[in-house]
């Protein structure tokens, strides 16, 4: 979820393929499973690129709220 947040705050799109390459976080299979869980919980959405080959991950309102709530709790 942090990688998605950073992509949103940096005003760039977070492509699913790019997120799967973040080997310093976890294996591609683990990242894929996490994305599926975030999608099922309504925390992210997937948007197809204009060329329909790539998918972009975007936070939903709920996802952004949850992230902000966690950030506040961690700051205490």
Image (tube, rainbow, N blue to C red):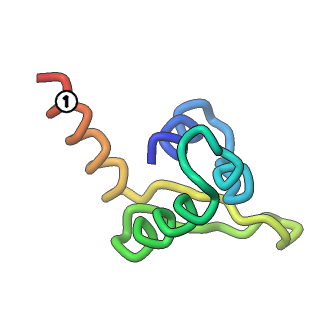
Q: Quadrant of residue 39?
A: bottom left
The picture places residue 27, in percent across and down from the top left corner, at 60, 55
**Front in this rendered view, residue 34 or 67:** 34
Q: Quadrant of residue 68?
A: top left
Q: Residue furthest bottom?
A: 40
The picture places residue 60, in percent across and down from the top left corner, at 42, 59
**42 above or below 72?**
below
Q: Is mark 1 on a helix, strand or loop?
A: helix
Residue shown at the point (41%, 65%) measured from the top left: 38
**Front in this rendered view, residue 45 or 1:** 1
Label 1 crowding class (10 Å Cα cut-off): few <14, some 14-19, many 20+?
Answer: few
Q: Residue furthest left?
A: 76
Q: Decide if residue 4 is on the left or right side of residue 19.
A: left
Residue shown at the point (37%, 70%) measured from the top left: 42
Q: Decide if residue 39 is on the left or right side of residue 10.
A: left
The picture places residue 12, in percent across and down from the top left corner, at 68, 39
Residue, disc 1: 74
Q: Which residue lies furthest to the right in this view?
A: 51
Q: Decide if residue 63 is on the left or right side of residue 2.
A: left
Quadrant showing the C terminus: top left
């Amino acid at each position: 979820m942090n990688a998605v947040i950073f992509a949103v705050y940096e005003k760039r799109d977070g492509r699913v393929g790019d997120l799967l390459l973040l080997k310093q976080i976890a294996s591609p299979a683990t990242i894929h499973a996490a994305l599926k869980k975030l999608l099922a919980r309504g925390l992210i959405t997937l948007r197809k690129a204009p060329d329909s080959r790539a998918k972009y991950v975007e936070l939903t309102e709920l996802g952004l709220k949850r992230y902000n709530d966690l950030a506040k709790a961690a700051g205490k």
